[in-house]
Structure formats: C-alpha cells, structure tokens
Image (tube, rainbow, N blue to C red):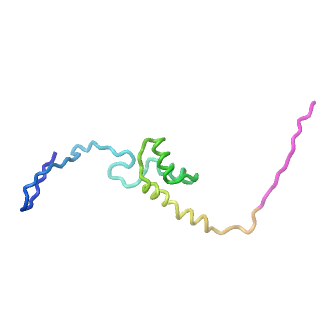
C-alpha cells in the first residue's frame, strides 16, 4: 500500500493508494503490454458479424461461449478493420461474361 500526501498549503490530506506491486493481475483477453487481440477471438468476432449478427448479438455470444466480457465499442473496432476489404470487393470490376450451367436429371429405380 502506498501512502500519498497532498502537498497543498490548504490541507494536510493523507490518502492511500493501492498498487498491484507484485503484478499478479492477468488480463482475460489482451495480454500485458499488448495492444491487439491475438487469441483468435477477433476472427470469431468477424465470422459472427459476417453471418449477419448485430454487434450486441456478437457481444452476447462471446460472453456465453467464452465467458469473456468485451465492449460493443471494441467489437465495432474489430469489425471496422475489414471495411477496406469489403469496399474493395464491392468495387471490383465485374467480368462481362459469366457461364451458367443448368443440370436436370430424373432417376427412376426400376425392378430388376
């Protein structure tokens, strides 16, 4: 426990400030001194979002399946990372000709 003193001329306030000196805290989702998700959760978030789930549904599903609380803002940030790829796909040049093959078949089982 660290005791902090206020050096104001008006008050002689003494307060306590707790610190995690032993560094015993382990984060659930993002490791210490890391800034990005590398646990595979981000791919799952993108897959769930690509299936048509809302951001709130993705948050709830991650909570239910993995027991990890993640904010809606973080999910939006992860899904926004693929927006340039989506835009590139939407604006790609289309081919002038696409072959289509129709197959039709009837199968009768006859007595032999």
Outermost front residue: 10
1 left or right, relative to 90 = left
Quick one: 27 or 10, which is closer to the camera?
Answer: 10
Outermost top residue: 112
Q: Tell me the residue at 14%/51% (across/down).
A: 15
| Percent of width and height locating residue 52 | 58, 53
Find residue 23 and report its image quarter.
Answer: top left
Q: Tell me the residue at 38%/49% (across/down).
A: 30
| Percent of width and height locating residue 57 | 51, 49
Q: Could you tell me which quadrant the C terminus lies in?
A: top right
Outermost right residue: 112
Tally of marks: 0
Find residue 107 and report its image quarter.
Answer: top right
Q: Could you tell me which quadrant the N terminus lies in?
A: top left
21 left or right, relative to 74 = left
Quick one: 50 or 61, which is closer to the camera?
Answer: 61
Q: Tell me the residue at 50%/54% (across/down).
A: 55
66 left or right, relative to 12 = right
Q: In the picture shown, does residue 67 fall above or below 47?
A: above
Q: Which residues are magenta?
A: 99-112
Magenta stretch, main secondary structure class = loop
> Does the magenta-highlighted stretch encompass residue 63?
no
| Percent of width and height locating residue 37 | 42, 51
Q: In the picture shown, does residue 111 fall above or below 105?
A: above
Quick one: 10 or 19, which is closer to the camera?
Answer: 10
């Amino acid at each position: 426990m660290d005791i902090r003193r206020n050096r104001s001329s008006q008050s002689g306030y003494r307060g306590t400030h707790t610190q995690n000196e032993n560094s015993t805290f382990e984060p659930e989702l993002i490791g210490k001194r890391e800034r990005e998700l590398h646990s595979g959760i981000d791919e799952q978030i993108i897959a769930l979002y690509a299936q048509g789930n809302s951001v709130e549904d993705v948050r709830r599903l991650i909570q239910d399946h993995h027991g990890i609380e993640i904010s809606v803002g973080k999910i939006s940030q992860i899904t926004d990372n693929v927006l340039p790829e989506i835009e590139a796909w939407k604006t790609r040049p289309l081919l002038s000709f696409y072959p289509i093959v129709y197959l039709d078949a009837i199968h009768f089982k006859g007595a032999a």
